[in-house]
Image (cartoon, rainbow, N blue to C red):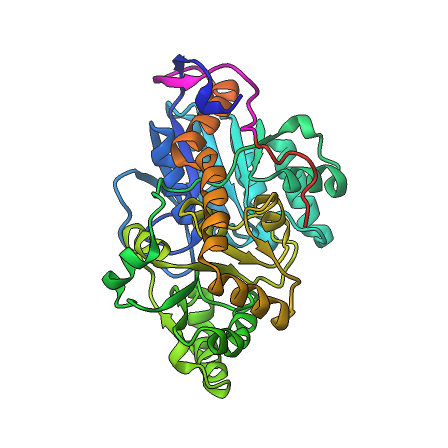
Amino acid sequence: MPAGDAPRQEIPIAKTAFVSTYAPVRCGIATFTADLALAVGDREVVALDPPERPGQYPIEVRHRIRRDVREDYLRVARALDASPIGVVSLQHEYGIWGGPDGAHVLDFVGALRTPTVATLHTVLQHPTPSQQRILTDLVKATAATIVMSTSAAELLERSYGIDPAHLEIVPHGVPDLPLVAPDTVKPQLGLAGRMVILSFGLLGPGKGYESAIAAMPAVVRADPSALYVIVGATHPEMLRREGESYRRKLQALAASLGVSDHVRFIGRFVDAVELGTWLEAADIFVTPYPNLEQIVSGTLSYAMGAGKAIVSTPYAYASERLADGRGRLVPAGSVEALADALVELARSPEWRAAYGRRAHEHSRRMLWSEVGIGYRRVFARVSRPVVAAGPVATTGPVMVPFDTMAPARV
């Protein structure tokens, strides 16, 4: 039974402290945490400060941890233990925590007496010994661990020796966007009459944008109105090291292929409202990631939530989410296969609509309102004595169910 269908009653929910990067830091995990904290309810935030000081935090940020200062982790752990916090929700990705491979996360959870729930944003198929030890020790030190896909849970059991009873599956949340005809939205962005292919996210190597740009000559021959839009600022770490050299490299590639007029960069961080407009205006969404280990993708989740026809390489998360006709999978690194899929969809509004409807229907289980219920159920089970209350579903398994729990199909 989906969590949203279960009977709801008042269940005591302890106040939650979310430990993560946080706005005004501009990264996917910071955005995820802000949305999750809002969906869960009674909360405060512990912000993980990157080396560059991010500026003024919103009022819910009660503590700050400087990423590379070990004493900050111990100080904040003591402060949380002395507060009326009932559970700590910790976001894990190696790069946002200090120490070698983010090892300071173990200092933090080791010092905490408050029950902790970790959400894993990265699970590597081929970790280094240090990465494997840190993730394994983190899971063992927490009261529960949340992953966002069946493939992530299976990988943790198979390659890390994690007891599946310790794992919960709750999907990546998405905003509640309606299904709309892209042509009705395009004029707002100056895109009337264009066939719009979209990618978004922080710009940096490893996302396969080169392949998508290389596919554009074939797409343009099939549809001269085609426009590939890449929305997003350059990743802060890359910007600090190399400036905008990577963006210029992609622009030079488009120029060398004669498609500069068919590739557009929106080189800034867009807010949720503007991002929703770009998604609604897109005819096709593409995630051409070459890294097939990727275990979660917020961008693909959001595209499903907007009901887009999606073309993707078969990385783990995409293979699971786009199964059963919810999108098109193409081999990683094959420009020809990617171009063929884009051309096929560009020529067929019927296929675009069919893929989009299936993706949108599946994403209703991923709405932030449903995800918030899933997290609150986990928090209610592990939290220390109650300080607040709220409505939450109480029947059924803690895991948010999917109809794709069988092994993913490519």
Q: Is residue 204 above or below residue 397?
A: below
Q: Which region shows up in magenta? A: 385-401
Q: Is residue 333 left or right of residue 264?
A: right
Can residue 75 be found in the magenta stretch?
no
Name the image quarter holding residue 199: bottom left
Q: What is the x, y in percent for residue 274? A: 29, 55
Q: Residue furthest left?
A: 188
Q: What is the x, y in percent for residue 374? A: 48, 27
Residue 66 in view (yes/no) = no
Q: Which residue does the image show at 57% across and 70% down from the upper left? A: 339
How many marks the image carries: the answer is 0
Q: Which residue does the image show at 46% across and 44% down from the upper left? A: 357
Q: Is residue 252 left or right of residue 387?
A: right
Q: What is the x, y in percent for residue 346? A: 47, 64
Q: What is the x, y in percent for residue 114? A: 49, 26
Predominant SS along the magenta part: loop
Closer to the camera, 351 or 27?
Answer: 351
Name the image quarter holding residue 371: top left
Can residue 395 be found in the magenta stretch?
yes
Q: Is residue 76 left or right of residue 128?
A: left
Q: Is residue 393 left or right of residue 337?
A: left
Q: Is residue 113 above or below residue 59?
A: above
Closer to the camera, 114 or 148?
Answer: 148
Closer to the camera, 341 or 109?
Answer: 341
Residue 151 in view (yes/no) = yes
Q: Which residue does the image show at 67% across and 43% down from the upper left? A: 408
